[in-house]
Image: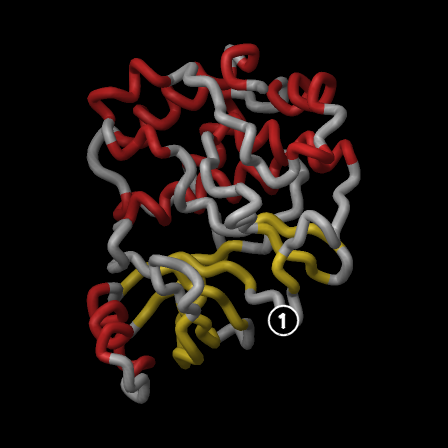
Amino acid sequence: MLRQVTAIRYVTPLREGGSLPGVVEADDFGTYVVKFRGAGQGPKALVAEVIAGELARRLDLPMPDLARVELDPVVARAEPDEEVQELIKASAGLNLGMDFLPGALGYDPNAHPVEARLASRVLAFDAYVENVDRSWRNPNLLIWHGGLRLIDHGATLYFHHDWARAEKVVHRAYPWDDHVLKPYATELATEGPALAALLTAGLIDEVLGLVPPEWLDDGDRDAYLDHLVRRAARPEAWLP
């Protein structure tokens, strides 16, 4: 289970993202970047963050820790921005936080070469979860303490925005031409199948168990499990 904390202070909004995440301090003395349930993307973005992020961790990819963040809108009472105030009010209750990485740098593919094995595994992972948001325009990667960190997976698993059509796209190919790590992913032919072999039904079921039930509709958990297990079974369809 993801650890659970309670927000005690809203620090500042992060306006780089369309969902207007914010930095908060919590009762465990930690600082988190919080994605809010009341943002335009709704709970599905948080579900994608949990599933993709925790799969990445279990596949030994570098992910900041995630946490369930309980939010009382009173923590933002000093925030002058009305848009932020409304967002916080709409997000009372359980939200998703990611460890804040102080001093982290945005990833620059020209300044930060990535070792071939790691780049290949990240690309294979993104192909599996259909991450369309890891391009050179918006890498969603950080450099922290000299190492790569994966962030922002709310745009993955986009099949769940149209369950009626999900059956038809379970083995959809991945458009990898714009992937920011493509130039470094020279071991994809070996690392891709090796990563895919780790995507067992048991692993996927374990990760789905981390999604708070209140973020899911009836039947969603079984639908995610069926789709992701079937996609994992045919890596030749989605590996570039």
Q: Is residue 151 left or right of residue 213?
A: right
Locate residue 30, reporting x and y percent.
Answer: 55, 72
User: Quarter of the image holding residue 19?
Assistant: bottom left
Name the residue type under label 1. Pro
Q: Which residue is mark 1?
A: 102
Quadrant of the image for the C terminus? top right
Q: Is residue 118 left or right of residue 88?
A: right
Q: Dot 1, how many residues are within 10 Å of its Cα: few (below 14), some (14-19), or many (20+)?
A: few
In front here: 60 or 109? 109
Image point (65%, 38%), residue name = 181
Locate residue 192, reporting x and y percent.
Answer: 65, 22
Q: Tell me if residue 112 comes above or below residue 4 in the rendering.
A: above
Locate residue 165, reporting x and y percent.
Answer: 24, 20
In front here: 209 or 11? 11
Image point (50%, 59%), residue name = 98
Q: Tell me if residue 49 comes above or below residue 132 in the rendering.
A: below
- Secondary structure under tag 1 reads loop
Locate residue 231, reporting x and y percent.
Answer: 45, 17
- Image label count: 1
Image point (57%, 19%), residue name = 239
Q: Tell me if residue 183 comes above or below residue 46 in the rendering.
A: above
